[in-house]
Image: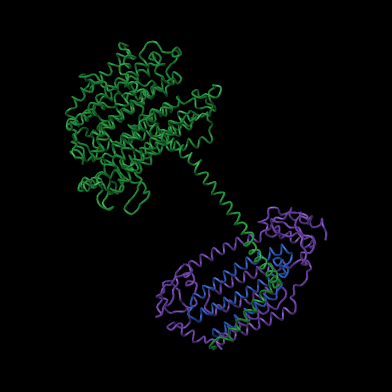
Amino acid sequence: MTVLQFLFGVFATTTCLGAIMVAVTQNIVRMAFWLMVSVASASGLFFLLHADFLAAAQLLVYLGGTVVILVFGVMLTAGGRRQPLTPKGGETILAVSLALALVALLMFTVGSVDWERLQTASQPTMPEGGLVATTSDRSPVAGAGRLGDTGHALGSAMIGFRPRFDGEGRLELGTGYLLPFEIISVHLLVVLIGAAYLARAKRQIPGGPNVGRTNGGSPMTRGPLAWDPDSAQYNDPSAQSVEQALAGNLASGGGFSAFSPEEPTSIETRQTAGEGRPA
Amino acid sequence: MTADSLIIACLTTAWLLPLFGTVAISLLRLRASRLSGLPGVVGVGCVTAAWGLACLAGIVWLATGSSEVGHEVLEQRRLVGDWYTLASFGALKFPLGYAIDSLTIVMFALVTLISTAVHLYSLVYLADERTECYLDHHLHGPKGEPVERPGRFGHFYAALGLFTFAMLGIVLAHGLLQIFVFWELVGFSSYLLIGFYQERWAARQASFKAFLMNRVGDVGFVLGMTILLATCGTLLLFPSHGAPALPETFAAAVDAAQSVPADDFSGTHGMSGPASYTLLVAAGLGLLAGCVGKSAQFPLHTWLVDAMEGPTPVSALVHSATMVAAGVYLAARVVPVLLPEALLVLAYVGITTLLLGASMALVARDLKQVLAHSTISQLGMMLLGIGVGAWEAALFHLVTHAFFKSLLFLGAGSVIYAVHHEQDLDRLGGLRPRLPLTAFTMLIGVLALSGLAVPYVTIFGESLGFSGFHSKDAIVSGTMAFVLKNPQHLLLLVAVILGACLTAAYSLRLWLRLFASETPAHLSMLKIHEGPWPITLPLVVLAVLAAFSALGGEGGWLSSLVQQSAGLMPGFGSGTAGRTFVVQWADPEARHAIHGTAGAITLTAAWLGALIAWAVYGQRIISAADLSRQFGAITHLATARWYFDRLYRMFLVQPVLVLAGHVGRMDKWILDPLIDAGAAFSVRVSAWSRWCDEGIIDKLVDGFGRGVWSSGLSLRKAQTGHIRQYVLLAAAAVVVLFLLLFAWMPGGK
Amino acid sequence: MTLGAYLTVAAVLFAAGLTCMMTKRHALGVLMGVELVLNSACLNLVAFARYTALGIDGQIFALFVIVIAAAEAAVALAIALNYYNNFLTVDVDRGDELKR
């Protein structure tokens, strides 16, 4: 058992354990913690796979994202008593059995493919380790293809140059990923704007319950409802005032006040509208 | 900066400045009130600056070019270049560019100078437009009161600036297409200016007429350009950057055409062979049609007299000195593509117009109409000059004519301004004591126009005559030299001498009737006086130029400058024979040789005309009424303007109207019932088809919709709306699908 | 420590993520499940990049997956926030408005 095998064992175990714990735990904060454990271990696996840049990105992006989720989980679940969001027993059993079946299926698939043959057949003259080449002198991009240094290769591929090996093992420049790179950039921009728009605090008309259509049925929307066609939001007077204050705080941007032009008044109107008509 | 680029920069700026003025005035209109005199100041400033730049360019040109003056050394100096290529189709290119030679410089200085004078003059002449409610005394409302309208001072200056810009554009252009663009812009701004008093019916009609008449000529222009483009492959007048220009390519096309049999009129041979000679003649004639329209020549001359409905400064700038001269200018520029046949047509058109215009000027009663007819007549003389090969003489006359004719028009404007818009010669007279400066400057203009001089007397080596004498002399000597070589065209010489006589007669008649008699024709004229300085200053400046601009005659500086740009003139002097007849061109030496004889004959004729006018209107030895009775038929014809307007109305307008009436009736009685019947039929059909729709198709669609609706309702139960359940189902589906795949996959491991 | 081992780890990750998505009623729990699933795909791509001729391309696609995951997390958080604003809860089972 080499050091690498030992490290793989550690990382694989923590990754799987973290993932399973995410699925098992019911508290959202703990789930987030286990997710961090799992993601960090996965980045360790990336390091073992010579994907140093990706591993770093994984640590930064995923872990950062998970921390944000953690914060949100705390924010959204803090305050007030609430019913625990536990699933029904039957559902859980069904889901777990399905997941186990899927794992079995995937293991069977993995086991039934001859990966060695695939590996040797597809890269006849490749030196050991797929990406790794000893031909760094012939590389058009400095450092590309050297063992464990994928930053250069990734960067040059992103701006349109992709060093790769042809059939005879010679290094040549393939078409890069400039266009996907641009598309993903625009995509990120769109997401940024879209997320900001979605999370924006919306204007609420302090209308009475009789303004819009009434709609009963689900436990949450029981009772008369105020329908604001502009913001498509419900004003539910039956909700508890603590929650309402919290919601008003969120809706008017208590923590995100950059989007709210009328921060104090909207809370006021919400509360008066809610108290004016008790459930 | 080299001298060449300095000249180019100066002229380009001078060209764009009036446009800038127009834009500035148009923007100013948004802010300034109608009472403001600012538009006038802006307009005058822009045009004066343009004039200064043109003069600067001229000085640089003279300082850097060769200074030899005379017939011997005619240096070919020309700056040609492109600014921008508008479009290019294969080898065919349409560039925008400039061509500057001495003629361009002269024309720039001329146009900007007269434009400046007119801009200045209009400050006073149109000052009553600077009001919110202008009372138009020529118009009467239902109770006879004058019609009120907002003043249009800024509008006037904007249009004037636009005109100047367009005219300079024509002068600066280096290709026919570019000329055509500004040609049309000139026509448009002329339309605006003629119809300036747009509330008056006559002004509206006149602007409309001028526009339409010009379009008739422009059709010819476009056709000519098309033929040239097809046969020569370019529209450039001057070679630029090695690109071939019309003179060479046209000469090549003519050489190719000479090899085609004479009786072959099929145009081109299979689209690639040489063009036929007839086609090439037609190209020249087409271009000349444009010139004839713009220069108000027979048979398209009728619009110019009506154009006098515009304000008098406009008449001075647009309809005497510059725009109508654009036709002559173009004819002079396209001389290389005019074959002898076309040139002869031009000469005969010229003399026809010359005599027609002179005869009408002799009997016209309206002050401005006399000048308008005179303009037509003088332009005819210029075209005659081009037609007989006296190219530089025609352009020489163009320049001097611009000076004295704008002077005369501005003088007439001064009179009209002083007597409060009275233009009828019968009601004017005896104005000299009240308007001494106007009388004196107009006398200079009249003498220049009539070409009078004192024979055999010279002071400092100069003959005692004004500018018109020299230039007209040059044209007559050119004609005479031509006739000596081609005796069968004697008519040209007779006509031009008769024209000189008539010119002197009508111009003196004008002056004598306005100023000569001691007593004013009307009591109200006792109190009139000269206008302020913006009116008199242009008169004095133009009078000086009209008197002395042509010093030295054909050897003088002005004529030499014009001659420098003579350029490549194939045909002239080489005796090129036309296809249908032989024409011998006179060379400049021959022209110069008979200069004295021609001058003597012209001067005699002019003095004869002047004497008659003096006898009739000055001394009243001969009664004018008797004279008109004696020449009753001609007087009648000339007074009725030779019935051209009525002729056109009868043969062109009336048939169209009658035809339109018939067509209208046909529409009403035949087509309308047909269409009504068709409509009724289609109403029936659509009623039937509606029944089909409602009874059959609607039922089908409804049934289908109901089916989909009910099936949707039944399927809806499967949708729980729970996301987690969907995920679960998807995962289950994946598992089941893979299981099925493994169960039936061939081969397996 | 071959490709198969990595794929096995990825399979476990995937199954755990799927279970998360199926069982969690908390909106952020579902989001974490999605993150796990994406992470397992990422791990697969990198493993194939290491052991087959996929080469650097696999890592590039893994990078794209990470970017997509980040974008997805941002949008999902915004949706969750909006959801909370509308329903005053983060229980995804309440969000069955479209059914009606």
Viewer-proximal residue, A263 or A64? A263
> Whole-percent x and y of residue B513?
36, 16
Quadrant showing the C terminus of chain C: bottom right
Q: Colour of chain B?
A: green
Viewer-proximal residue, B642 or A36? B642
Viewer-proximal residue, B359 or C60? B359
Task: Name the quadrant containing residue C24.
Answer: bottom right
Q: Chain letter for purple? A: A
> Whole-percent x and y of residue A24?
70, 78
Q: Colour of chain C?
A: blue
> Whole-percent x and y of residue B461?
21, 23
Task: Name the quadrant containing residue B160.
Answer: top left
Q: Residue at x 68, y 69 (%)?
A: B712
Q: Can you see residue B1?
A: no
Check the image and report above or below for C98 versus B58. Answer: below
Q: Can you see residue B154?
A: yes
Q: Residue at x 75, y 72 (%)?
A: A85
Task: Name the quadrant containing residue B560.
Answer: top left
Check the image and report above or below for C64 versus B583. Answer: below
In the visual, does B421 lie left or right of B227? right
Check the image and report above or below for B190 versus A94. Answer: above
> Which color mode does the image show?
by chain
> Whole-percent x and y of residue B273?
25, 52
Quadrant showing the N terminus of chain C: bottom right
In the visual, does B99 lie left or right of B528? left
Query: How many numbered marks have been drawn onto this rendered protein structure?
Result: 0
